[in-house]
Structures are given as structure tokens and as C-alpha cells.
């Protein structure tokens, strides 16, 4: 019996690679292969050797073939969704010259501030790129490299994002997509092209950059014979341009031009993000005004400290991550890696409001609350970027979709539910980034719209939790501490 066509969606995140083997017709998840990454660095440094990602992709595909029972000959397409913003610099043979600077490497904060000033301030950057340089953005990291390791910058023959690096290994083609490119701060969301003036400001030659495909589902090549041999797959299968992880999650949810628009999503992972797909080009300096993978836009706010920060607090308290209670009077802002939203790259954690009767369980609950309030405060700005009034009862009644690893945790779900006061939808498919990449792969193989494909797969569906009365007392207590403390006590 001939197996139905299968596509592979790769989620190459900060901590690991997942390869989701998916039935191209139904979206049924057949199996998932996984392999870990190694992140190094102390203080503000966060780096990974890009070769680690390639080896992890190979391991994940091999494990996925085994887990799914897929005949390799049934695979028709592959796409990579990667962690955003990372800076990969290559030599003329395509080999990394140094470990990649990751999105959560905060050493480039001074360069981000200087770049912002050099162009005339936040509004000038937003008008061109949709976003303001912060330490996370690739432009800031390239500027850091130029100033701190000029020999490597001078020797660089190619500059790539993490997902670009892997796509090029698969297809032998230097390509990216508008979504991930819009996180560099050298791509213009106004023109849909690299901005020549910004490249000149950065001393970056456009010839070092990959071509920008029309969408994340654009077929940019086919799997090379060499890569096919390494992966155990047939050569010649479709390779999509791929995209960034947040853009891929939006596709997996069925968000975009041929799907659902102007509905909010909260992703709970290493970072916390809130975003929506919209046809309105974002123009708020408070947000990252990204492009989406399908030609729409993806206004997004991102925090550096989410599940890993809360897990660290749980470990310090020697508690299980679910052994938490509401924080009471305690407020804990778990900014253990600096912070991106608000822009406090040198921040550390802050604990206040302790009493004799404060329990370890309440301290852990306060860490959840601090992380959740930080990302939820940006939700209204995302809705405004979509042209919506957050105070409109109809807008306030739109469900908040909760995705990412934290969405599988009871305490995370109940904390967000209590502090947002919104109905929640928790999609049953927990691999939305990988599934979105699979939809991109299916689009590359068939020519169909990836959002329409994902909508037909119904991956974004799940039980809806009714809203509960909003815990305004906790919201205002945490928000008050954040407003009064930043930046003097946090940095």
C-alpha cells in the first residue's frame, strides 16, 4: 500500500530541534523526532555553534522517520522555522566563522541604543523597518561584532539568520522570507526589500545577504543529493523558504490572509510573546512590527523571561513548577536574562513585598504573575496595531489563544486566565511551530497557500475556557512595582 504524501516541519528553537512528520492531506501528526541544542555563554552572552543545529536536524529527522514509521520515499517537502534574530556569519565555503549570537544575547544593547540615535530615534526606525533596534535584533548584533571582533566581521562572506543557515544546507540556496527578514532591522516592511541606507549605516554589503522569497512557502530549491544522504531522505523534494518561529506558529494556527486575522495569541516558551496576524502595517515603537510568512503582518511584543525564568525560581525554591499559589503581597519580576519588553537589557530579577507569612509556594506564584503581567501588558498595544480598540467589548471578548510549552502547564494557564480576564483557547496540537513549518513545506510542494492548508488541518482548534473575573488587585500591584522600579532598581 502506497503511503500518502508526507511533509516535514522543522522547529529549530533555542533549546532543541523538532521534526514533525505530517500527513500532507489531513495534517495528522505522524511522529516527531527531537534533538537537543547546547547554548553557551555567561552574563549577557548566549551563543550556539550553528553546526549544532545541523547535527540536531539530522538526528531529529532520523528519529522522526523511526517514530512515524514513514517511508522516506513518501516525503514530498521540508521547511524550517527557526529562532529569530540570531546572527550567523559564514566563510566562503558556508562554514560558520564563530558561534552564532542568539536572540537573547544582550551584549549588543549599547550598539542598539547607538543605532537608534544614529537614524534619528525610534520613530525613524519604525517608519522603515517596523521595529526599533534592541539588543535582540540582528542589526545590533552585527554592529557588536564589527566593534568587538572586526577581523571576523571583515572575513564574513555571508550573513544568515538561523533558519536561513539550515535552509541553505538543505537546498544549497541562499534564501530567507519576509517574516524572519523583518526581524533583522535592515529589511524594510514598507518596501519589502533590504534598506540600502540602513545597510550603509551598518557597513553591511547586500551581497552578503540571502535573497528574500515572496513567502515562507515559496519553493526556493530542492533537497540536494548531499543533504539527502545525510538525512536519509530522497533528493529533489521541495524545500520551502521557511520562516521565523513566531511566524510559523501563526501559520500553524491558521492565522493570515486566507485564515483568521486580528485575533491575539500568547506564546509561553523560553520567551513570552503576544502577537496577531493583520493586514494593517504596524507602526508602534513599542512593538516589533514584523511581516508575517504569508504576506500579511505580525505585530509582536516579546519578553526574554518566561518559562525558563519561572522554572529557575522553582528550582531555587526546590518546588515542582506546578506547586504554586497566588503571590499575595509578594511581587517577583523574574528578569534573570535582562529584559526586552520593557527594554532593560541589563536588568536582574526583583523581589519585593515579603512578609513573615509569605510561603515558598507564593513566591513561585509571584514569579508566574511577574512574567505573565510583563507580556500581557503589551496585548492592548498589539490590538491597537491591528486597528482595534482594546476597550471595545467585542474586541475584549475575542479569545486569547495560548500556545508554547507553558500552555501545557496548569499554573501557566490559570495565571494567564486570572490576570487577562479573557476567554482562552488552548489548541490541542502542542507543536504549532513545527506544524506551521509543515504547512509551509506542503505549500512549497503543491503551490497552495500555507495558511489555507493549516486551516484545513484545523490545528489551531482546542477547548475554550470561559473567562474568569480579572484579578485587578494583582495586576495593579505588579504593574505598579514595574513602573516604579524601572529602570533604576532593575538595572
Image (cartoon, rainbow, N blue to C red):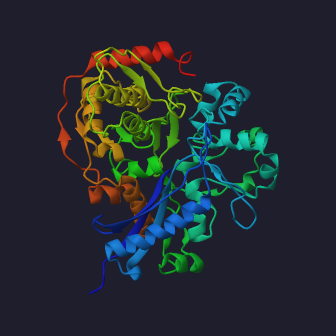
Quarter residue 463 falls in: top left
Q: Which one is in front, 263 or 305?
A: 305
The C terminus - image quarter: top right
Q: Position of residue 347 (x, y in %)?
A: 55, 26
Q: Is residue 330 left or right of residue 195?
A: left
Decide if residue 345 is on the left or right side of residue 98.
left
Residue 222 visible in this rendered orientation of the protein:
yes
Q: Residue 366, position in %: x, y?
A: 34, 26
45 lies left or right of 269: right
* Residue in view at x 24 percent, y 30 percent: 397
Instruction: Please tell me which residue is depicted at 19% across the width and 30% down the height of the picture.
Output: 467
x, y percent for residue 139 = 67, 41
Identity of the residue drawn at 31% across and 77% down: 4
Up-down relation of residue 196 to residue 166 (above or below): above
- Percent x, y for residue 349? 49, 26
Q: How many marks?
A: 0
Where is 87 relative to 230, above or below?
above
Rendered-image quadrant of the N terminus? bottom left
Residue extending farthest bottom: 1
Between residues 182 and 375, which one lies in front from this camera angle? Answer: 375
Q: Is residue 275 visible?
A: no
Amino acid at each position: 500500500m502506497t503511503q500518502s504524501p508526507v511533509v516535514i516541519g522543522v522547529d529549530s528553537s533555542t533549546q532543541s530541534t523538532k521534526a514533525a512528520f505530517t500527513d500532507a492531506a489531513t495534517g495528522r501528526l505522524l511522529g516527531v523526532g527531537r534533538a537537543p541544542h547546547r547554548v553557551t555563554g555567561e552574563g549577557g552572552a548566549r551563543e550556539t555553534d550553528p553546526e549544532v543545529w545541523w547535527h540536531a536536524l539530522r538526528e531529529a529527522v532520523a528519529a522522526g522517520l523511526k517514530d512515524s514509521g514513514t517511508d522516506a520515499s513518501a516525503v514530498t517537502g521540508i521547511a524550517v522555522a527557526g529562532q529569530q534574530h540570531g546572527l550567523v556569519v559564514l566563510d566562503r565555503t558556508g562554514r560558520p566563522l564563530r558561534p552564532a549570537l542568539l536572540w537573547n544575547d544582550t551584549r549588543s544593547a549599547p550598539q542598539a541604543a547607538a543605532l537608534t540615535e544614529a537614524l534619528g530615534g525610534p520613530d525613524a526606525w519604525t517608519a522603515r523597518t517596523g521595529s526599533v533596534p534592541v539588543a535582540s535584533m540582528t542589526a545590533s548584533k552585527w554592529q557588536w561584532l564589527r566593534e568587538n571582533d572586526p577581523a571576523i566581521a571583515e572575513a564574513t562572506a555571508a550573513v544568515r539568520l538561523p533558519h536561513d543557515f539550515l535552509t541553505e544546507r538543505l537546498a544549497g540556496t541562499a534564501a530567507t522570507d519576509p517574516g524572519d527578514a523583518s526581524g533583522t532591522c535592515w529589511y524594510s516592511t514598507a518596501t519589502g526589500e533590504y534598506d540600502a541606507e540602513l545597510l550603509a549605516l551598518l557597513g553591511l554589503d547586500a551581497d552578503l545577504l540571502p535573497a528574500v522569497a515572496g513567502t515562507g512557502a515559496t519553493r526556493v530549491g530542492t533537497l540536494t543529493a548531499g543533504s539527502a544522504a545525510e538525512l536519509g531522505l530522497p533528493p529533489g523534494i521541495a524545500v520551502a523558504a521557511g520562516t521565523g518561529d513566531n511566524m510559523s506558529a501563526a501559520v500553524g494556527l491558521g492565522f493570515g490572509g486566507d485564515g483568521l486575522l486580528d485575533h491575539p495569541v500568547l506564546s509561553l516558551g523560553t520567551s513570552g510573546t503576544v502577537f496577531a496576524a493583520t493586514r494593517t502595517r504596524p507602526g508602534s515603537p513599542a512593538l516589533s512590527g514584523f511581516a508575517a510568512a504569508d504576506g500579511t503582518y505580525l505585530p509582536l511584543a516579546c519578553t526574554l523571561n518566561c518559562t525558563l525564568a519561572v522554572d529557575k525560581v522553582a528550582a531555587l525554591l526546590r518546588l515542582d513548577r506546578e506547586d504554586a499559589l497566588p503571590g499575595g503581597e509578594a511581587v517577583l519580576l523574574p528578569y534573570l536574562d535582562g529584559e526586552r519588553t520593557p527594554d532593560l537589557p541589563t536588568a536582574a530579577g526583583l523581589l519585593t513585598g515579603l512578609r513573615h507569612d509569605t510561603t515558598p509556594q507564593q513566591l513561585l506564584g509571584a514569579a508566574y504573575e511577574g512574567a505573565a503581567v510583563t507580556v500581557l501588558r503589551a496585548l492592548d498595544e498589539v490590538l491597537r496595531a491591528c486597528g482595534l480598540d482594546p476597550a471595545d467589548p467585542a474586541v475584549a471578548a475575542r479569545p486569547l489563544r495560548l500556545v508554547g510549552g507553558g500552555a501545557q502547564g496548569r499554573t501557566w494557564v490559570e495565571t494567564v486566565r486570572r490576570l487577562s480576564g479573557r476567554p482562552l483557547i488552548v489548541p490541542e496540537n502542542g507543536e504549532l511551530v513545527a506544524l506551521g513549518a509543515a504547512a509551509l513545506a506542503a505549500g512549497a510542494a503543491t503551490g497552495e497557500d500555507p495558511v489555507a492548508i493549516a486551516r484545513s488541518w484545523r490545528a489551531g482548534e482546542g477547548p475554550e475556557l470561559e473567562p474568569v473575573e480579572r484579578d485587578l488587585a494583582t495586576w495593579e500591584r505588579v504593574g505598579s512595582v514595574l513602573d516604579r522600579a524601572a529602570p533604576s532598581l532593575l538595572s
